[in-house]
Amino acid sequence: VDGRTEVYWVMPAGTFGSWNATAPLPSSRVFHAAVSHGDSIYVIGGLEGFGSARATVFRGDVGDDHEIDGWVEARALPDARYAHGALVHEDYLYVLGGAFSGSAATQTSWRAPFEEDGSLGEWESAMALPAAVLSHGATHAGDRVLLTGGLEAWTSSSDETASALLGGGPVTWGPAAPLPAPRFAHAAVRVGDDVLLLGGWEDFTVGIHDTVLRAQICQ
């Protein structure tokens, strides 16, 4: 299957302008993760087309003209993975869970520091997740990471959520309010004092959701 490598940007105004193509990715990706830090975008892991999982991390620097000035390879992950979560916290890139290949999920996570020049420092082991999970949501509120839903394998979805303090020390996971129904392959984002879950699947027998769920962050 041939994947797509195009990247598009929109005008930074109160409403969206038209989509414009910018520098394409060096190779096609699906089930990858992406974050931004400073003026750079990082595309992490994923499947190349529908082939094998990749450990590659691509970095694209955004110029004053809003164009991506090409892509370079940043420090690769210690292992290949896809359907993982990724977030930025205090100048660290976290990669959470996912799968190495096939359908088996993992509990392992990695983190790497952002260097001043935009490169990534050495990867180190980060928090072990409370359970092996892939295709989950991952976001953070302050110093806490929030995991939502996901799959233990490509068979059973979860309505569970969990949170823990981010950092380099020992981690204790605690339960958070469960979702109204199982959800995977969704997006999770923090907006102010709320966490939003957008779209996704409940299971493979139910159509893809257009619903958006909202939960308030308790300070």
Image (cartoon, helix red, strand yellow):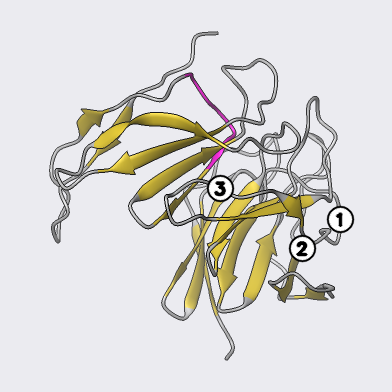
Q: Is residue 156 above or below residue 194?
A: above
> Is residue 95 found left or right of 3 in the rendered image?
right
Which residue does the image show at 77% across and 54% down from the upper left?
158
Q: Dots 2 and 3: beta carbons under 8 Å?
A: no
| Amino acid type assigned to the residue bearing label 3 in the image | Leu
Mark 2 — residue?
160
- Between the residue at mark 1 and the residue at mark 3, the CA separation in whole angstroms equals 27 Å
Q: Is 75 on the left or on the right of 60, as rendered?
A: right
Q: Nearer the viewer, mark 1 or mark 2?
A: 1
Instruction: Decide which of 46, 18 is in the foreground and name it.
Output: 46
Give the alpha-carbon distance from disc 1 to disc 2, as whole Å.
10 Å
Q: Position of residue 115 (x, y in %)?
A: 50, 55
Residue at 70% x, 18% y is 52
Estimate how packed mark 1 is, as few (under 14), some (14 to 19) or many (20 or more) residues with alpha carbons within 10 Å. Answer: some
Local crowd size for mark 3, using a 10 Å CA cut-off: few (<14), some (14–19), many (≥20): many
- First of labels 2, 3 by sequence position: 3
Spatial CA span between label 2 and label 3? 32 Å
Location of residue 4 in the rendering, given as x and y in whole percent from the top left corner: 42, 19
Q: Which residue in the structure is indicated by mark 3?
A: 120
The span shown in magenta is: 27-33
Q: Quadrant of residue 21?
A: top left
The secondary element bearing badge 1 is classed as: loop
Q: Quadrant of residue 49?
A: top right
Residue 140: x %, y % from top left: 58, 69
Tell me, yes or no, whether the two marked residues, 1 and 2, touch with CB atoms within 8 Å.
Answer: yes
Question: Quick one: 35 or 213, which is closer to the camera?
Answer: 35
- Nearer to us in this view, 113 or 187: 113
**Other residues around mark 2 within 10 Å, as few (<14) / some (14–19) / many (≥20):** some
Q: Residue at point 56% right, 47% down?
A: 120
Q: Along the polypeptide, which appears first: circle 1 or circle 2?
A: 1
Query: Which residue lies under the disc numbered 1?
Result: 131
